Image (tube, rainbow, N blue to C red):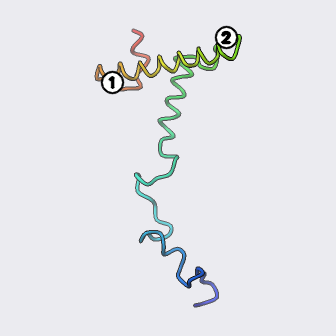
Amino acid sequence: MTSGQRRGPTGEDPKASFSGRRPGTALASSQAGPGRNDHLVETIIGTLADQFKVETTRARSLWGVMARLGAKLLAFNLSLLRNQRLGRPRLAVKHLYL
């Protein structure tokens, strides 16, 4: 063992225990971290902000905010279900108004 190599407490190379994967190699998409759905989450948040105006509720109490936000989320989920049953893209919420 040279002075530049690190070893674990039992003497093995700690990087070799990554289930046969070489250090520095990319993970498969099914093993990717939590950032893999960033685009979908941003699209949904944008739809909620643009179509359902979730930033403004004009409620006067906490219960009013919760009721209105719940109603907007229910409407969004029902629009996803309706688009799925019509065979349209699920996030095409704007086309349901016409």
Q: Which mark is residue 15?
A: none
> What is the crowding at mark 2: few (fewer than 14 residues within 10 Å), some, or many (at least 20)?
few
User: What quarter of the picture does the C terminus occupy?
Assistant: top left
Exactly how many numbered labels are in the figure? 2
Residue 49 location, x and y as percent?
57, 22
Q: Report if the CB atoms under discs 1 and 2 are less than 8 Å apart.
A: no
Q: Is residue 31 above or below residue 78?
A: below
Q: Which mark is residue 84?
A: 1
User: What quarter of the picture does the N terminus occupy?
Assistant: bottom right
- Most extreme residue toward the bottom is 1
Between the C-alphas of marks 1 and 2, the distance is 31 Å
Q: Is residue 98 above or below residue 52?
A: above
Residue for badge 2: 58
- Left/right of residue 49 with respect to residue 63 in the rendered view: left
- Most extreme residue toward the right is 60
Residue 84 location, x and y as percent?
33, 24
Which amino acid type is shown beneath numbered disc 2?
Arg
> What is the crowding at mark 1: few (fewer than 14 residues within 10 Å), some, or many (at least 20)?
some
- Left/right of residue 11 with respect to residue 31 in the rendered view: right
Residue 53 location, x and y as percent?
58, 17
- Left/right of residue 2 with respect to residue 95 in the rendered view: right
Give the residue at x 63% y 20%.
55
Q: Is residue 50 above or below residue 98?
A: below
- Left/right of residue 38 with respect to residue 56 in the rendered view: left
| Disc 2 element | loop
Residue 39 location, x and y as percent?
49, 38
Give the residue at x 41% y 19%.
79
